[in-house]
Image (cartoon, rainbow, N blue to C red):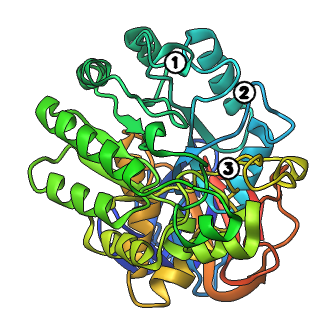
Amino acid sequence: MLLLKNGYMIDPASGTEGYRDILINTESGRIEQILPQGAVEQGDFGCSTESKPTGDPEEIDLAGQIIAPGLVDVHVHFRDPGFTYKEDIDTGAKAAAKGGFTSVVLMANTKPSVDNVETLRYVLEKGKETGIHVHSCANVTRGMKGKELTDFEALSANGAAGFTDDGIPLMDEKMLREALRRAAKLNRPVSLHEENPAFITNNGINAGKAAAYFGIVGSPREAEISMVERDLKIALEEEADLSIQHISTKEAVELVRQAKRHSSHIYAEAAPHHFTLNEEAAIQYGTLAKMNPPLREEADRLAIIEGLKDGTIDMIATDHAPHSMEEKARSITEAPSGIIGLETALSLGIRELVNKGYLTMMELMCRMSYAPAKFYHLDAGYLAAGGPADLVVFDPDKVWTVEKFVSKAANSPFAGERMPGTIAYTICKGKIIYRG
């Protein structure tokens, strides 16, 4: 048994917050009891004599730190199989644990891609060897070529959490419609990367001030807007669960807002870099701030924050995208897009959203745990007796310096910054998997 004492519990599933003592069954990996603060000292475990734990539990005094459900990131790239010099499932899981994440959903653009049962099984079996819950999407189309749908039924039966060709947009409308129908029958969501390549000359840099600085054409906002508009229309007609991934433009936020008024099947995610930075960061940091979709204008950043505030954007997802420093050292047009994000996401949420008054801590925890878990039907994102003992403990005021990443990669514009939100413990399946 493990007893977490004197923590300030925040549970976004029930809306409960306040000082609690939490008793964890380390053998079952479940929460045994959630008790009033100090109840254990009074000899009251809140359960009957028959179920009362025997012996004294290991105790950790949290001294008023926040205790919340383990964070859930539904958009990460662990590069395994095929690109393990960038990241692998083990190092990605360790980076997740350091960032307070106990559940992740992997994207399927590996090599080979997760368009077949064999590769899916490899990823999930390797994930079981880590200390966290590793889930994976499967591809919508074979080889991510947009020509032929994968075997949704077989992939779902073997544990696919959802379907996506993240990294490549699905251009065939009829194929998208059929994919949504199949996924809906299987009660699996579809997540879409929304950038029409017909609009893009140079990806990763906004077609505006940043592109002009580098003397390139860049990626215009229309690339995202046109795809979001089309795909929301189809999803509304098919009544299928659809998430707009890493939203970046104010127009796309408004399109999602309008669509959600007509359907409960529409979702959207925002990455921390998109609510923290604008295209000025691309000018300052170069390839370290190059990502797809790119950092946009300040009005877009503020619109994303407003979307998170009013619930238009349900989830915060990092789009953790590791690359080697050699790759990022290439020219602005040749370097790959993407930044790592697992180890800085919570702190950016605290600094940019909570401390600036846009979200309460309860709302941030909802966007980072309960809502993403709900979208992918995961047993995660909540704190309750009998529920999973997946928790994060952190001090929202204590400052730390971003350095020495656990990830294999270090491609982040936030390196060297001091941020609030120091993680003390990450606990998954009742075991402490990270100590700050």
Label 1 or label 2, whichever comes before in sequence order: 2
Residue located beneath label 2 in the image: 126
Name the image quarter holding the C terminus: bottom right
Residue located beneath label 1 in the image: 145
Looking at the image, the residue that sits furthest to the front is 215
As drawn, is 196 to the left or to the right of 226? right
Residue at x-position 21% and y-position 61%: 257
Q: CA distance from mark 3 to mark 1?
A: 20 Å
Badge 3 density bin: few <14, some 14–19, many ≥20, Cα 10 Å: many
> What element does badge 2 sit on?
helix
> Is any atom of residue 231 visible in this view?
yes
Residue at x-position 51% and y-position 33%: 168
Residue 423: x and y in percent read 68, 73
Label 3 or label 2, whichever comes before in sequence order: 2
Residue at x-position 57% and y-position 51%: 292
The quarter of the picture where residue 413 lies is bottom right
Q: CA distance from mark 3 to mark 2?
A: 26 Å
Residue 23: x and y in percent read 54, 63
Q: Amino acid at mark 2?
A: Lys
When the figure is inspected, residue 119 is found, relative to residue 193, above or below; the finding is above
Q: Amino acid at mark 1?
A: Lys
Residue located beneath label 3 in the image: 337
Residue 165: x and y in percent read 49, 29
When the figure is inspected, residue 420 is found, relative to residue 253, above or below; the finding is below
Q: Amino acid at mark 3?
A: Ser
Residue 212: x and y in percent read 61, 68
Q: CA distance from mark 1 to mark 2?
A: 26 Å
